[in-house]
Image (cartoon, helix red, strand yellow):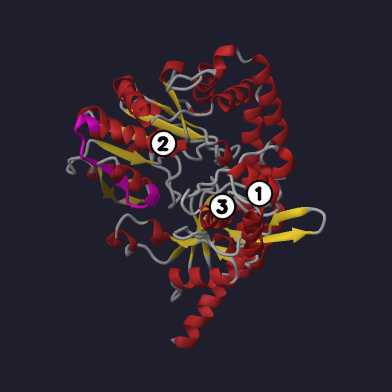
């Protein structure tokens, strides 16, 4: 939003060298514009006022303005003063985000931000503000607001079968922070190695490594994680996505779930369960959380990102008592805390049943999208197989013979489509070479009116890569 500094009384921080005030004023204004501390459309103070504030001659400030006008950074409007035109170059050393070149983003696991339950959230915020005690506006407990922890304990027990009381719940900035806290707590205990699924988020492996744990990949098959391989790895913990393996889309079988619980109890290891989209299964056969099989060994993690919005930045963990104090100690060391008012609003949303309604609505939308994606692919790419459990916000698209993932990615980029191949989620090169070329397609993110266009772009990227392969073959 444009700011009128002359009229609004806003202060502007300008560092001036007392030995060369005029030159340093010019450089300070140039930097403030380039770094967007002065946004395009901001009205600068009159030269007379700025000169008085800075102890400079008015003509000196006018000369600085004139030079910046000549460079195109400022513009003079007759009878209206001097204004910031805009940024003509990035600040030195700044990272330039070029992701805007992607008109369509079909990365796995992204939700449709246009589906955010604005009205329900607005009511929840208003209710939370009206009912919040004065203590809610002070520094909060590291484990989170009691109102939300109570609401989540009830909700998770009812919908996911999680064994938890309010005292077991820790509210975090999404699953990433929970994973970091648990990993650092394990490392502080002396743990050095943690098992991970052979395919998964590279960012999660990076979080574990940053905490001092070595991620050890474990193979996957049609029944999920090959649990029997854990015994000989010398690991103290394992990170799993049992309800819907990300990104291969297979659930952990009942036999493997039982084996995982037995291994954790016998070895004293910790299971970190990422239940990232457990509420979104479309075939009517809900898979409950693994945590109920071994609550004393399992850290259960979930978020509001898929059901509501990633913008809320709220996640939660159900942490067993043997690890809870150490996790909270790491939270205190990090100095972080989740926004208390948003926590109270989410608690109000859950307690009123609006969170359940948001989940059901999202489940219906994503189920319809998965079905439509399969129909459009069947018509546009005959013989191409859509794989993965009918759940969540993504699926796999197995590519035709001779077509590689990298070629499809490049063809997609050329038409503004962003998505990636399965190999990009592999924990190592050996894993990446074990499966045929396959794309991970997220059908959650595109808004409804652009969904068919997004699928058409997927089809076009595969066809372009196949045509290129034929012409060079």
Q: Is residue 200 magenta?
A: yes
Q: Position of residue 230 (x, y in %)?
A: 23, 42
Seen in the image, is 263 located left or right of residue 128? left
Mark 2 → mark 3, Cα distance in angstroms = 33 Å
Which residue is the site of mark 1?
368
Q: Position of residue 301 (x, y in %)?
A: 43, 33
Whether 5 is drawn above or below 108: the answer is: above
Seen in the image, is 401 located left or right of residue 264? right
Task: Return the residue nearer the eye: 411 or 79.
Answer: 79
State the count of labels: 3
Q: Residues within 10 Å of mark 3 (few under 14, many from 20)?
A: some
Whether 330 is drawn above or below 197: the answer is: above
Quadrant of the rendered image containing residue 242: top left
Whether 309 is drawn above or below 189: the answer is: below
Task: Return the residue nearer the eye: 175 or 254.
Answer: 175
**Which label's residue is closer to the chain start, 1 or 3?**
3
Residue 265 visible? The answer is yes
Which residue is the site of mark 2?
177
């Amino acid at each position: 939003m444009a700011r009128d500094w002359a009229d609004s009384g806003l202060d502007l921080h300008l560092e001036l060298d007392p030995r060369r005030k005029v030159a340093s004023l010019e450089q300070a204004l140039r930097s403030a514009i380039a770094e967007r501390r002065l946004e395009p459309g901001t009205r600068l103070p009159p030269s007379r006022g700025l000169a008085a504030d800075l102890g400079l001659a008015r003509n000196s400030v006018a000369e600085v303005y004139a030079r910046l006008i000549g460079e195109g950074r400022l513009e003079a409007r007759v009878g209206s003063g001097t204004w910031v035109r805009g940024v003509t170059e990035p600040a030195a050393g700044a990272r330039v985000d070029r992701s805007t070149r992607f008109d369509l983003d079909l990365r796995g696991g992204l939700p449709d931000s246009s589906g955010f339950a604005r009205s329900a959230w607005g009511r929840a915020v208003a209710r939370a503000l009206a009912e919040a005690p004065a203590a809610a506006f002070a520094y909060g407990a590291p484990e989170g607001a009691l109102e939300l922890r109570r609401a989540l304990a009830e909700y998770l027990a009812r919908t996911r079968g999680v064994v938890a009381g309010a005292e077991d719940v820790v509210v975090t900035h999404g699953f990433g922070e929970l994973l970091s806290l648990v990993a650092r707590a394990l490392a502080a205990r002396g743990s050095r190695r943690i098992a991970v699924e052979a395919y998964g988020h590279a960012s999660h492996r990076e979080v574990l490594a940053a905490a001092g744990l070595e991620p050890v990949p474990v193979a996957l098959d049609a029944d999920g994680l090959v649990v029997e391989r854990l015994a000989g790895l010398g690991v103290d913990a394992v990170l799993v996505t049992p309800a819907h393996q990300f990104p291969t889309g297979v659930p952990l079988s009942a036999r493997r779930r039982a084996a995982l619980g037995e291994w954790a109890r016998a070895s004293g290891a910790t299971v970190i369960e990422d239940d990232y989209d457990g509420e979104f299964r479309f075939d009517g056969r809900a898979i409950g959380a693994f945590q109920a099989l071994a609550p004393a060994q399992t850290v259960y993690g979930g978020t509001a990102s898929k059901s509501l919005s990633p913008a809320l930045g709220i996640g939660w963990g159900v942490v067993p008592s043997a690890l809870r104090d150490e996790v909270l100690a790491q939270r205190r060391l990090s100095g972080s805390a989740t926004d208390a008012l948003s926590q109270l609003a989410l608690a109000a949303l859950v307690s009123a049943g609006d969170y359940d309604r948001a989940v059901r609505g999202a489940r219906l939308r994503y189920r319809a999208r998965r079905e439509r994606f399969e129909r459009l692919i069947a018509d546009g790419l005959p013989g191409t197989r859509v794989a993965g459990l009918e759940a969540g916000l993504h699926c796999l698209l197995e590519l035709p013979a001779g077509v590689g993932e990298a070629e499809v990615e490049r063809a997609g980029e050329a038409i503004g489509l962003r998505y990636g191949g399965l190999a990009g989620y592999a924990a190592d090169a050996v894993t990446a070479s074990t499966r045929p070329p396959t794309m991970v397609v997220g059908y959650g993110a595109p808004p409804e009116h652009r969904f068919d266009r997004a699928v058409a772009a997927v089809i076009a990227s595969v066809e372009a890569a196949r045509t290129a392969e034929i012409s060079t073959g």
